[in-house]
Amino acid sequence: MSTFTDQYWQSPDGLRLHYRDYAGGDGQVPVVCLPGWTRNARDFAGLAERLAGDWRVICPEMRGRGDSDYSKNSATYNPMQYVQDLNALFDAIGVDRFVAVGTSLGGLMTMILAMVDAKRIAGAVLNDIGPVIAPAGLARIRDYVGQGRNFPTWMHAARELQEDHAAAFPDFTIADWLAMAKRVMTLGSNGRVVYDYDMKIAEPFEAPGGEAGVDLWPGFMALAGRPLLVLRGGLSDLLAADTLREMAQRMPEAEVLTVPRVGHAPTLDEPEAVAAITRLLAQVQ
């Protein structure tokens, strides 16, 4: 039996956007899970199922991903638009405060949300992302996003992911790669396995904190005064160890944790990540 319901909201420019809503947490702020650049609500299934009941967990899918509408204007595939879309969701469902769990792009959105109105954020997890994005990781992502590859079977898709990302997940079994394939891909209309996002999301590629040159340190510092967890994959090429150290120096009250033998990005199902998120939520009032 499903632990979530599929719900929809409308973006300011009229797109029908999808989110998963896991019930629970009467009287508590909800947990809002914000996915990475090419990812969708399925990325957070493990975390959401662990928290559901004790917490309401909301997993939005940004425009152009999963079951959300694709935009006719690829220029709207940018973090500032995603934040506008999220604010429309919060207004629609009456969420004033929340705990943000942001992976990669989701962490950039968390920092932007904090710059706009930090009072809305009751606590935050930044998963393998910081105010500075390492050029090597950015180049790697640029190399594979938007290529439109497709596969005849799920096993072919899993083997392709293994070939592309084995360095980031050296301990994954073929079962893990199959599970990842089913998170990031879907069956296309022609029966082939395809990536579950609009290939046009690659066109703008002007993410704040990256090549656009936007300074996100103020967004990070705006998260002060609330429970904050910063996770880094020990093998990450997107969040450099030097950046993590600077984040810890600037925000000594935050918990800063490196997840061993994982690259970009931790799945949040690792025992170290599970325990750290449990500690963070225990601090949220």
Image (cartoon, rainbow, N blue to C red):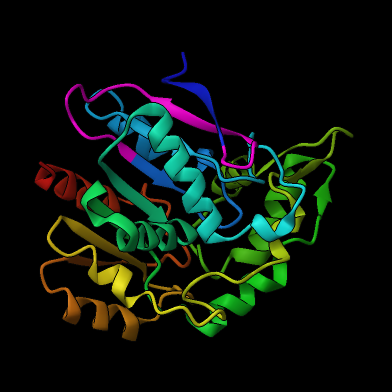
Q: Position of residue 32 (x, y in %)?
A: 36, 41
User: Is-magenta flag for residue 86?
Assistant: no
Location of residue 222 with respect to 50 vertically, above or below:
below
Q: Residue at x 64, y 59 (%)?
A: 162
Can residue 92 be seen? yes
* Total numbered labels: 0
- Which picture quadrant has residue 224? bottom left
Depth check, front residue: 160 or 145: 145
Depth check, front residue: 278 or 159: 278
Location of residue 277 with respect to 50 vertically, above or below:
below
User: Is-magenta flag for residue 16?
Assistant: yes
Q: Residue at x 55, y 79 (%)?
A: 212
Q: Residue at x 63, y 42 (%)?
A: 13
- Which picture quadrant has residue 175? top right
From which residue to which does the magenta span run?
Answer: 11-31
Q: Position of residue 271 (x, y in %)?
A: 28, 50
Q: Spot the residue most to the right.
A: 190
Does residue 279 appear left or right of residue 75 in this picture?
left
Does residue 227 appear left or right of residue 58 in this picture?
left
Location of residue 71 with respect to 16 vertically, above or below:
below
**Prevailing secondary structure of the magenta residues:** loop
